[in-house]
Amino acid sequence: MARTGKYAIICFSGTGNTQFVSDELRKRLEDEGYFCNIYHADRIWASCGRGPGFRGDRNLAAYRMRDLTSDADSVILSFPTYASDVPDPIKSLIDLMPAGNGKSVSVVSTIGLIGGDACLIPIRTLERRGYRPVYAGYVRMPNNLKVPPLDIFRIRNGKDLDRFYDSAGEKIDKISRILMEGKPSFEGAGLGSVLIGLVQRSSNKLMAELFRRGLEASDTCVGCGLCVSTCPAGNITRTGKKPVFGKRCCHCLRCYNFCPVEAIQFTKRTKDAAKYPRYRGFADWKPPRLYSAARTD
Ligand SMILES: Cc1cc2nc3c(=O)[nH]c(=O)nc-3n(C[C@H](O)[C@H](O)[C@H](O)COP(=O)(O)O)c2cc1C
Ligand code: SF4
Ligand code: SF4
């Protein structure tokens, strides 16, 4: 039976995992005859004036969200879970989404291990605004977080990532079937998940402070500007050769993991790259250049 319907996936991916999952989901939906577009939160914000030292225009972003979702029957939000919460580049776009008027909404979040009830946060918000929730759940992907003191989990790269192609693939198959059947299904609603979510989110201020104090460029920086032009929060500027970190980091670790010479540190301890290996991304992912890295001095 030929299927009709149009999906808009609004995706944020700090280090590539969620982009991989979103691309795979799109392929599954298109194979079944649906239209499906992916819009990346970092590029949406860049098109609304976000750049090094600039937050971007919220009115313009609200207009863009209306425009991008207006002819879709279903909206899917995809993002990595950070401490049982939703990353700011996508949370701030959710706040700007137009009224749902019965449009369906789903959430697909990637995690390293456990996400609490993070995937339900956008669902609760958007249900109140007239959207019809269909799915919320997680796809387990490689962990991208190993910075002091949050360094209990292993970083895997290269061949160690192979097993995720199968496990993530199976979960994406399942999600696409649920979406097409349209029968509501939600992870993260059990008491355990809700409690994990509450506990993890209570550390949000502390995490923001750790990132604000921890991130810095060491003397090995070669001034290539990659971190400046790819930071999704516009949080990195430079007046001299070395980048300077501002106060609105969204905690994605894109800069830290993808600096070509591992010059970005999270406190001095991460200079020991054997102890603090960087995550190199999934399926050869590279961070997109969002803006010019011109010096501002
Ligand atoms: C600041 C931060 C917090 C994280 N918190 C969690 C978490 O609470 N639970 C979890 O399972 N994974 C957590 N992770 C791991 C990521 O969610 C996971 O690796 C995700 O797939 C990364 O997606 P991306 O490559 O699209 O950015 C965290 C990662 C970061 C950078
Ligand atoms: S990506 Fe690394 S080398 Fe390039 S400017 Fe940033 S800190 Fe320096
Ligand atoms: S400063 Fe680094 S960790 Fe923070 S938002 Fe920018 S790229 Fe992500």
Image (cartoon, rainbow, N blue to C red):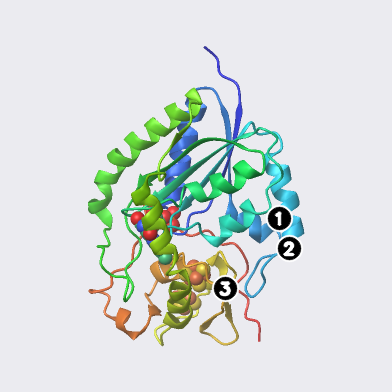
Percent coordinates x, y for residue 7 in the rendering: 59, 34
Q: SS for tag 1?
A: helix
Q: Is mark 3 within 8 Å of ligand 3?
A: yes
Q: SS for tag 2?
A: loop
> Residue at the location (70% across, 35% down)?
101
Percent coordinates x, y for residue 13 in the rendering: 48, 54
Q: On the picture, is 194 further left or further right than 69? A: left
> Residue at the location (43% across, 55% down)?
81
Circles 1, 2 touching at the beta carbon (< 8 Å): yes
**Callout 3 amino acid:** Arg
Q: Quadrant of the C terminus?
A: bottom right
Percent coordinates x, y for residue 232 in the rendering: 56, 64
Tag 1 residue = 61
In the rendered image of this protein, does residue 135 appear above or below residue 291? Answer: above
**Callout 1 amino acid:** Ala
Residue most extreme to the front: 191
Tag 3 residue = 248
Q: Is mark 1 within 8 Å of ligand 3?
A: no
In the rendered image of this protein, does residue 130 appear above or below residue 251? Answer: above
- The span from disc 3 to disc 2 (Cα, nearest Å) is 15 Å
Tag 2 residue = 57
* Nearest the eye: 134 or 238: 134
Q: Which mark is residue 137?
A: none
